[in-house]
Amino acid sequence: MNSTLSGSTILIVDSDVKRSRLLKTSLQKDPDSDYSFIEKGTCSAAIELLQTVSVNAIFLAESLSDSRALTSIAAICGIAHCQELPIFVTVEAEEPETVTPLLKAGASFCFSSANISSSLLQQLVRHALVTSDARQVQVAHKNITLNIQLEERLRLAFEAARMGYWEWDIPTDRMRWRYQAEEIFGIQDEQFNGTMDAVLALIHPEDQRRVRQILHTSLETGEDYKFEFRVSDNSRRIRWLTSNGRTFFDQNGNPLLMIGVLRDVTERVITGLNLSASQQLNQAILDSLPEHIAVLDKTGKIMAINKAWQDFALANGIGPEELHGTIGTNYLDVCEAATGDCSEEAAIVCDGIRSVLKGIVDHFRLEYPCHSPTEQRWFLLQVTPLVHIGGGVVVSHLNITERRKIEAQMGALLSEAQRARESAENANRAKDEFIAQITHDLRSPLSAVLGWAKVLKNKKANEQIREEAIQAIIESAEKQTNLIEDLLDISRVAAGQLRLDVVPVSLSAVIRSAMDVMQPACDAKGIDCTTELATDADAVTGDPVRLEQVIWNLVSNAVKFTPNKGKVKVRLERADPYVRITVNDTGCGIKPEHLPFIFERYWQPDSFSGKRKGGLGLGLSLVKYIVELHGGTVAVESEGENKGATFIVNLPYRAVRLQPREDILPLATNSNVAEDIEPDLFLESVMSSSALEGIEVVVVDDEPSARELVAEILRQHGATVKKAESAATAFDLITEGERVPDLLVSDISMPDEDGYMLIRKIRNLPRSKGGAIPAVALTAFGRMEDRVRALSAGFQMHLPKPVEPAELALVAANLTNREIKTLVN
């Protein structure tokens, strides 16, 4: 019997039991063989068997219930130890189209059981088994050679990778080490007894419990394991090792063998720890910054974000899970997919990041809006390249909303400051022009006064010239007085101290009175000046003097800017709930750009061109202030240059018509009583030339002309006057005379010692020495605070310069308790 054939196992895979029996009978008749047979009816059963059992040859039916021969051959040849086995395929017919594909697939011989003899079949099987055995010997030799080569390669690989291999024979508790595992672990033969406990004792105490638990889990469950742990060598230097492996079990589920690979990862761990510390430091730095920061790799994927980015995302609707998935998201894709209000900015951001990543630009910056439902927000985007760490960029978004608000506020403040500066420059220019004009306007009447005074001094002047001179002096002085009154009024306006004497007033009477004053000026220019006064709009409550000042200023302004033969019309009408006064002219009109400045102080419509019409530019500002004090409004309209102008005054209408006061002169009523009497002439008419007879008055003023004028006025009314050029002289006249004078008339502004100091010294005297002498203050300062200061200092009366003669005489009479002898009974 051939030893090669002895004990050979043949697998018969055929669902036809009869054919399978005939095949087995034919082979058993071979005297040179001693075969054992295994029979399977399906391909799947055969494949399952071959996974764990080795056979020497396979007989395979062409057609099985679960597979065809071609498929079965491929499945068998897919098993490693079956690739060299002889495979015999029984076919129905030995046709080329059937046999050829089977032989190509791996079949050794194809035959029909009906066409082959037992002896031929026996020979074919013997030859195949012998040939297969020889090939297997060659393969085994080749495998041994390959194993030796593989072992050498493994050793070299383990050494190069500083890795070792170990096995633990669990039943005997013996450890076996290969490929420098002892060196890696730090084991010395004389100190190691080869047990697992001895190995575990070498592990760092803090890691032992964890390692034992991992090994125990693998022994219990069969799970592969991997763990990292520390050991210390003889120099007590800590080293980090990693081990991963698997546990094998017997057929009863008992653990037999545990294998593992050991590696020294000390350098990696130390590097990792250093890197981790560096990363933690970098992350801490990033988290400390207020900007929303993301670090992108060179493809645009997010590698890291800081706390500000996370907080902003959470505050704007991003959930924790979605935020957790931010790392690894491609930021460029997010920008490209953006929709809504910010999609355009997102596209610009995407292009900017790509430009930095490609090196086209070294930096990108963009300010963009990103508004929430409750807030208008602005951000500053900056993209900076990571040049030295493999590419990528840092993207930061800084919330600059507060900065933008501050910039807007600063811009508004700057614009406001620029407007204020321009306004101040205009005001200063207007004041300069005003000073130049007031110098001219005050000098002109003063020049006339001085000139005519010199004419009067010349004794050659006849009576007619003397009369003309006196009239010119009076008119010039009154003109200068009016200018000064305007200045005082504007000063009171600036101080908020312009007061109204409010009474029931007939506006028609006020308008007629103002028109009477302006009629000579209209006649001189040939201007047709008319009025249209509605009877149902006559009654208001106000200050008649100030209201006449309003009408006079408006009409005077209209006459001034209307050329010869022009027209001026004043209209009074009801415009509920107001009474409306309209002053219209056909004059030069007002440019549109000048309209906003009409009611400003020191400004005139022609001030931009330098061609002034005269005046100080105060009248219209006073008009506005007086009208507003009455609770009304004033406005101006003009279609442009050379198209005239219309001023409109609205005053609150008094619902109940009251009888106007008749003691207000010269604006009382439409009657003829005292209608045309000037105030100083009226006072002269009720004062006797001897009203102050027997009164001794001390007059003190450092200006000789002013001192002499006051003394002459008082002497004309019968008073005895003592003159003093200083406060000290006046004090001596009061205290050192035989008797105390009856009255003191003192200037305020004097050198060395002013009027306030003089009256305080006098009031400190006893009555017998003049401490109670009546006193009148004369001053060019006519403000309310000047009047209060004079009265507080000790004066009984305050009269502004230039003094009205009759008013001074009347005050002197009242203070000395003299009876006023009138001409009207």
Image (spheres, rainbow, N blue to C red):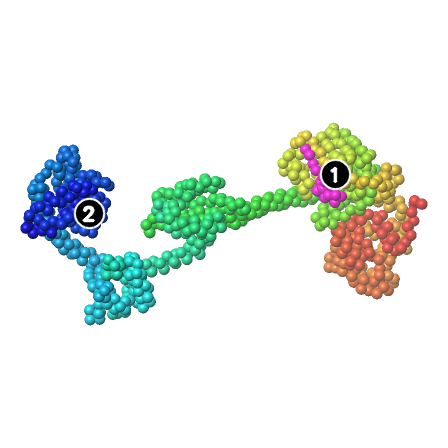
Q: Is residue 641 toward the left or the right of residue 192 in the image?
A: right
Rendered view: 18 above or below 734? above
Residue 321 x, y percent position in the rendering: 43, 50
Residue range highlighted in magenta? 618-638
- Return the x and y of residue 336 as percentages of the image width and height: 41, 41
| Place of residue 734 in the rendered image (x, y in percent of width and height, measured from the top left) | 83, 61
Using residue 19 as the reference point, say whether residue 553 is left or right of it. right
Q: Secondary structure at mark 2?
A: loop
Q: Amino acid at mark 2?
A: Ile
Q: What amino acid is labelled 1 in the image?
A: Asn
Quadrant of the snapshot with the C terminus: top right
45 part of magenta stretch: no
| Residue 558 in the figure: left or right of residue 722 | left
Residue at the spot 76% in from the left edge and 45% down from the top edge: 481
Question: Which residue is most to the right?
Answer: 825
Mark 1 highlights which residue?
650
